[in-house]
Every structure is written in structure tokens, then in C-alpha cells.
Amino acid sequence: MCGIIGTASTIPISKKDWLGKGRDTMVNRGPDSMGLWWSEDSRVGLGHRRLSIIDLSESGRQPMHDSSERLTIVFNGEIYNHRTLREELNALGQKFQSRSDTEVILAAYKKWGVDCLSHLNGMFAFAIYDSDRHALFLARDRAGEKPLFYTISEGGETLCFASELKALLSNDKLSRNIDPIALDCYLAMGFVPGSRCILENFSKLPPAHAMLFDLNNGDARIWSYWNLPEFEGEQCPPPSNEKILIAEMEQLLSDAVSKQLVADVPVGVFLSGGVDSSIVTALAARASTGLKTFTIRFPGYSNFDETEHARLIANRFNTEHIELEAKPTTINLLPQLAAQYDEPIVDSSMIPTYLVCQLVKPYCKVVLSGDGGDELFGGYDHYRQLLWMRDNLSKFPLKFRQLVAFATKRFIPVGFKARNWLLAMKADLAQELPLVAYYFDDLARKRLLGGTSPERLRAEKIFNQRVVRHPDLMQMATRTDFTNYLPEDILVKVDRASMLNSIEVRAPMLDYRVIEFAFRRVPSCLKATNNMTKIFLKRLAERLLPAEFDMSRKQGFSIPLPAWLSSGRFRDFFEEVLLDQGCIFNRRAVQDLFAGQDRGFNNGERLFALVLLELWRREYRVMI
């Protein structure tokens, strides 16, 4: 796990000092060593901060060159099948000077070119400069675990890229203007989706995409190298075939966990007490001895305390279990987190995620998580609710349901419980998905910003365009979450929180073989029904976990935000930020959100969204 940065141009680059400065804004991503390289013609510069995980020797340093020095790479992530690939490439005549997985990528590119991506099993963002082709090759992993931001100059002659947006902002030639459409998406969805970025003239390379930048003419070709497979299994398998599927899943996930336990540094597991992390713990304990597990608790808030369930799993599998207490004083973290999440997301669980990463740091440099289980296997409660709506609301005419949604938007205040589901009634679930995780609808966004032009209120249209159409509602919902919510929220949250603490988080359920199995083989009826979620993984859990394990709960790492906002330091800080004269949000609209929160509305995460964006905007001096 590292931080990468670079630039490539059709003309020699005279201003070079920003590259080293940008690299060092990411020191937490790679505190162990650093590197900087420029091509002889000054048209390519690559920088790297290293977090040493595989091959801790000097031979693993980056930027790394192949033996001919034709190829130069900077790489962030891990290639879990690097040992197998090394053996295969050795047999094909490739020679190696290190044990590093970075060198394996170079050798794979040397052998297969851009098609090397189909051979890689891992999480990654990398750039390879090919001096023979005068081209820079960039790629990002299939699920989007590792980030990659970039910007191309107005004339198209210069490309700049980095693991984090803040690194690119070290180049003072680049403007810092907010993209109004991206802001609209953030306020509606809680993140900026796809290739769009919160800042104008910046972009993200989407998951499972690659780019080839031609230094001869400035052409930047971007393509998708992998897609989710179509479902090919039985729709409703008999119990005997279901058991076969579960056994296949256990074998696949066991292999993924085993591969991700490989490191030259200590490895542990995040254990929230939920099904996903408990399964990962069970399989990791099977493959490793002396396993450490970590969780976080909130004294005085029993609804958010999962330590009892985590202890049950830790005791059952004889792990060395370590706990951390979180308190409302963690408000002091918010400015620091706003700076780290240089493209903000609406997810207050970034706080406990950061804290548990901080807890892990003295013990482990690598930790496994259960991320991905909800999107792959139907774990979110909104899947159950969507199925219920499909089965029960179809008896009402669509025009009537649209009228209910219209009235809800105008007469029921933001934050009122069930408001989002009333708005969702207008959706035709046979061919579309409602935005159920709605933070602010178009009227609320317009009011928050003190009025804005209608052409800038495009979040709903953008979300609708990003829905992965499928005749099966569960397939449509899980595929849409996999390509939107997972890479833009969950994986961003984990990447930034872990990197701020200089640790690497690995997600065995996001091994691409597990992903493909989940979407190709596991039918919707084994993912969720209108009264059950995550059925398939719970059946696997029955094979692996103690009989007394409670599978009905779903909490994960989260904070008691509504209670903390009722009074005290959290409330005072939020009001101080959002009612300040310099705040970009309409004062009356913000006051109404606070008033609604005090009346029991669900505005905590909405207020968090505004605070984080405002802190971020001030930190990076962003204009709106």
C-alpha cells in the first residue's frame, strides 16, 4: 500500500518541484521510503511513497525499472497471486531481481502488454511508463479499492495523476473550483459517482478501467477491461445444490483469505461482530495461528456496542482480541478527517473506521475486513424493503404513487422517518431503482444553496443513468450498489482512514473470483427476500460460526450520532461550523435541519454531510 503521483506530457516539463511536494502530502500512505524519477527528456515524472508490505528490502523501492530500463512503474496496492504469476512468468523466460509484487506487474506488462490486467488478482492503482511506445499506462483494480485521480490540461498535452486529490493540488497552476454538478451529486447521494470529481477539470479513473496516454499526440484512451458477469446459475436451486454452492463459496473465500494473509509484516482482522467480518475471522484463524482481532465500543450506547458479539467470535477462534473505546470527544477528529477525505463522502462511520485503524497501528501493518459482503450477497436492509415494495405496491396505479411522492416532497420535511420510501413510491421497479439513500432532494438542495439554476440540479438524472439495468430487481439493486456505493463510499472510507494511520486494509470478499461467483452463481432468492437479507452468507456462517452467534443483527462500525448531536461538543461544533457567516449553505435551511433533528427527525447524517463539506472546502480553499 503506497501513494503514487506522476505526470506525462507531449512537451518537456519545466516546472517540476510540485511533484515532490505532492508526493509528500501523502506521507501517511508511505512512511517507509520515497522515490522520484524523471525521464531524460523531462516529459515524464513519477513519484512514490512506500508502505513496505512485500519484500521489505531496498529492491522493492519505487519508482521501479525493468532490467532494460525501458519500463518504469509506480504502484499502490497488492497483487495477491504474485507468487503464482512469478512462477508462470519464470517459465516463460522472465527474470526477477526481487521478491516484490511490483516487479511481477512489470514482467506481466512486458509479456502481455495492457492485457496483463486480466492476469492480476489484487487491489491496485498503477502507472507504467513505456519509453519504447512513448506511452503512460494507468489502471485501477476491478472493485475500486485503490484510488486514482487525474487531470488533463486544457490543450490536452499534459496528464497529471495521483492517489489522492490533495497531491495534485500541490501544483499551484491547477484551479480549485467546485464542480456544481458534482456538488449536486454529493448532496443528493452522499458521494460523487463515476469518473466525475468534486473539483472542476479533475477526474477519477473508474474501477476496472485503464488509460493509455500517448506522449506523441496527447491522446488519452480510456477503456473498461472487466465487467460483472451475467447470472448463469439456477434461479431456485434445491437444498442439495444449495449446499454445493455454499461449499464452493467456502473454498473460494478460504483461498482468498489465505492469499491475503501473505505479508512480510504482521496481519490482523477487523472484527465488528457482524456476519461478514466473523466469517473472515473464522477462515483466517483456520489458516493462521496467533491471529489478532480488533473492534471498537461506545460506553453508554448499548445499541452501538458490538463487543459482546465480537468477543464471542474471538473466543471461539482463540484470537488475540483488542478493543478500543470511542467517546464524543472524537469531534476533534473532524477537521483532520475532512483534510484526509480530499473528495468528501457522507459517512459518519469514517470516525470509528479511523479509530479502529488507529488502534491497529501498533500491532499490525495489514488487516483484513469483511467489506463487499453486503453488495455481493444482499446484506443491506433496503434490498428487503425494495422487494416488499415490488410485491405490495404494484396494486396501486403508478400515477397514484407518483402523486404521493410529489406531495411528500412538498409537504413532508426532510429527515421525517420513511420520507425517502414515500418518495421512492414513484419508481417503476420493473425497470428503475429509486434513490433510497437520499440526503437532500432537488427542492432541499436548491434551498440549501440559496437558489441554484435548474440545469445544475442533475443528481437524480445522473443516478438514474448509473443504475445497472436488469430484469431481476435484486440483480439490479446489488449491481448498482457494487458499481456506485461500494467504490465511492465504503472503499473510499476504508482507504483514507487506513492510509491516515499507515496501515493496509485487505478485503477477501472483493477477490474478483468471489465477486464473479456472487453475481454469476448465487441466485437472488439466496441473497434477500422481502423479510430476510444476506441469506447465502448466513448459511455459510452456520457452517463456520458458533451456534449461539446472533445473525439477525447488523451494526458494523458506526457511531451514536443522533445522541451526540442532542447536546454537548458535537452539537456545539456543528452549529459553529454551519451557522458561521462564511458557510456556503443557507442559514435558515441549516437551522431547520437542526430543529428537525431536535424533534426526532433523521437529520444527523445530513448535518454531518454539510459539516464535512464545509470543513473540506475551507481546508483546500475551494471556490464555489
Image (spheres, rainbow, N blue to C red):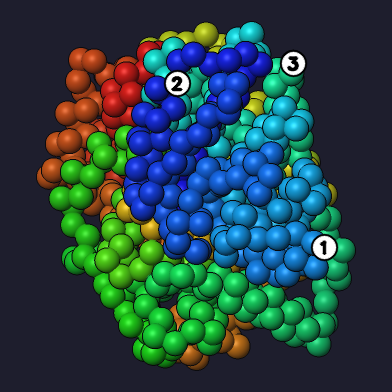
Visible residue check, residue 163: yes
Rendering quarter of residue 265: bottom left
Disc 3 to disc 2, C-alpha distance: 21 Å
Dot 2 falls on a residue whose secondary structure is loop
Residue 217 image label: 3
Label drawn at residue 80 = none
Assess disc 2: are there few (<14), some (14-19) or many (≥20) residues with their C-alpha within 10 Å of its C-alpha.
few
Q: Residue at x 65, y 64 (%)?
A: 82
Q: Looking at numbered disc 1 in the image, what kind of residue is underneath it? A: Leu
Q: Disc 1 or 2, which lies upstream in sequence?
A: 2
The one nearer the camera, 320 or 520, is: 320
Q: What element carries label 3?
A: loop
Query: Label 2 belongs to which residue?
Result: 16
Determine the CA span between mark 1 and mark 2.
Answer: 39 Å
Report how far apart the C-alphas of labels 3 and 1 lie in the structure: 34 Å
Question: Going from the N terminus, do you reach mark 3 or mark 1 first?
Answer: 1
Residue 40 drawn at (x, y percent): 58, 25
User: What residue did someone put label 1 on?
Assistant: 92
Q: Position of residue 46 (x, y in %)?
A: 52, 34
